[in-house]
């Protein structure tokens, strides 16, 4: 059984059923298609660890093929995101990232600061891919149903984990028994992990998502800032979607500091939600303490693009780079935090 509403969770569930022939039940939030975006899935992120860039490089072709097979030719957009550092420690992280990403064949270049006086460093990555999540979600739902994934609602979901990891899930649709529980994204981890197992591995955070009115065409289509994991995505109608690990009254500061001409934007809708990030900033995939549950989180923008690798790991089929990668990013005493920790700076706690 998987719990999660993100594209990462849906893709992993479908791959476990279709490719690895597992019986899968996915519990997700039914309102996901109607609420403001909580993720802006991108094939790159603000990453400093070489092995993560290596995994992304190795996964690109498989992920692009999978996503277009589900959503068609319009599932993926090609984009050249701008990455902005607005503090000196962010700038140091981006300087390291520049050399690592370039070494693994990503087309990345340094840019002049230009219209962002608060910026300390700016980079440009060319040829990245973004999932067009609004048209992609209905296609993902059809793909899951066709692949035999049973789907239900997380509303009123109660989970009981037995010794050995078996789970009994009670919900409005009835009772489900499964051999394993996977909390397949941060929303599920925060909602369903017991506090004594959540807190050592994850840090709670508050986040804000904004939908902005169409404005005079802005120069950037996608902007990333590692500070508060700020992300801004320009829409075809010149509106913007923005997600940041900040409270509502702090997001305006993030926008002005990170987005050229950001002062032109006016919110048309906003929502605040609670989430979590891994304590060391690195991806997490493995058992969550002694709880019996498994957790998959911390992949940032790129979770949907490494879904095939995550599914292989959960199915016990990971080999080579993938096996080594996930073995260091498991839970408990085997987690090699000193070797895998990522730069992260978040302002707000949940």
Image (cartoon, rainbow, N blue to C red):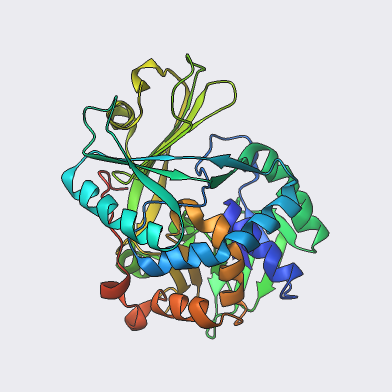
Q: Residue furthest right?
A: 146
Q: Is residue 22 left or right of residue 113?
A: right
Give the vertical position of 141 relative to 278 (above or below).
above
Comparing 180 with 8, the one in front is 8
Q: Residue at x 39, y 78 (%)?
A: 328
Give the vertical position of 161 relative to 299 (above or below).
below
Q: Residue at x 36, y 22 (%)?
A: 262
Q: Is residue 13 left or right of residue 346?
A: right
Q: Residue at x 71, y 51 (%)?
A: 68
Give the vertical position of 280 relative to 23 (above or below).
above
Quarter location, residue 263:
top left
Residue 4 visible, this angle: no
Quadrant in the picture for the N terminus: bottom right
Could you tell me how many numbered marks the image carries?
0
Comparing 105 with 215, the one in front is 105
Residue 168 visible, this angle: yes
**Residue 276: x percent and y percent?**
38, 54
**Residue 143: x percent and y percent?**
77, 55
**Residue 5: x percent and y percent?**
59, 51
Q: Residue furthest bottom?
A: 164
**Residue 261: x percent and y percent?**
36, 20
Comparing 284 with 32, the one in front is 284
């Amino acid at each position: 059984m998987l719990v999660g509403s993100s594209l990462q969770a849906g893709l992993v569930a479908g791959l476990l059923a279709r490719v690895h022939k597992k019986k899968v039940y996915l519990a997700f939030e039914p309102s996901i298609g109607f609420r403001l975006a909580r993720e802006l899935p991108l094939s790159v992120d603000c990453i400093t660890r070489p092995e993560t860039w290596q995994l992304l490089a190795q996964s690109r072709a498989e992920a692009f093929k999978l996503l277009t097979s589900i959503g068609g030719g319009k599932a993926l957009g090609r984009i050249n995101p701008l990455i902005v550092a607005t503090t000196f420690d962010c700038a140091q992280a981006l300087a390291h990232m520049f050399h690592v990403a370039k070494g693994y064949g990503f087309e990345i270049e340094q840019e002049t600061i230009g219209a962002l006086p608060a910026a300390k460093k700016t980079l440009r990555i060319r040829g990245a891919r973004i999932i067009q999540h609004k048209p992609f979600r209905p296609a993902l739902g059809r793909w899951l149903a066709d692949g035999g994934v049973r789907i239900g609602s997380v509303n009123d979901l109660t989970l009981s984990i037995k010794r050995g990891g078996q789970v009994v899930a009670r919900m409005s649709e009835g009772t489900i028994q499964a051999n394993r529980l996977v909390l397949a994204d941060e929303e599920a981890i925060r909602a369903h992990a017991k506090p004594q197992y959540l807190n050592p591995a994850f840090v709670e955070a508050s986040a804000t998502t904004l939908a902005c009115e169409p404005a005079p065409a802005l120069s950037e289509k996608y902007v990333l800032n590692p500070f508060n994991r700020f992300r801004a995505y320009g829409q075809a109608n010149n509106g913007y979607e923005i997600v940041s690990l900040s409270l509502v009254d702090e997001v305006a500061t993030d926008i002005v500091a990170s987005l050229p001409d950001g002062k032109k934007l006016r919110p048309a809708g906003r929502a605040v939600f609670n989430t979590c990030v891994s304590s060391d900033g690195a991806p997490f995939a493995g058992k969550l303490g002694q709880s019996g549950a498994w957790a998959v989180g911390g992949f940032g923008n790129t979770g949907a693009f490494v879904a095939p690798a995550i599914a292989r790991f959960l199915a016990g089929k990971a080999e080579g780079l993938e096996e080594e990668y996930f073995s260091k990013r498991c839970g408990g005493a085997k987690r090699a935090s000193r070797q895998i920790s990522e730069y992260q700076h978040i302002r707000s706690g949940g």
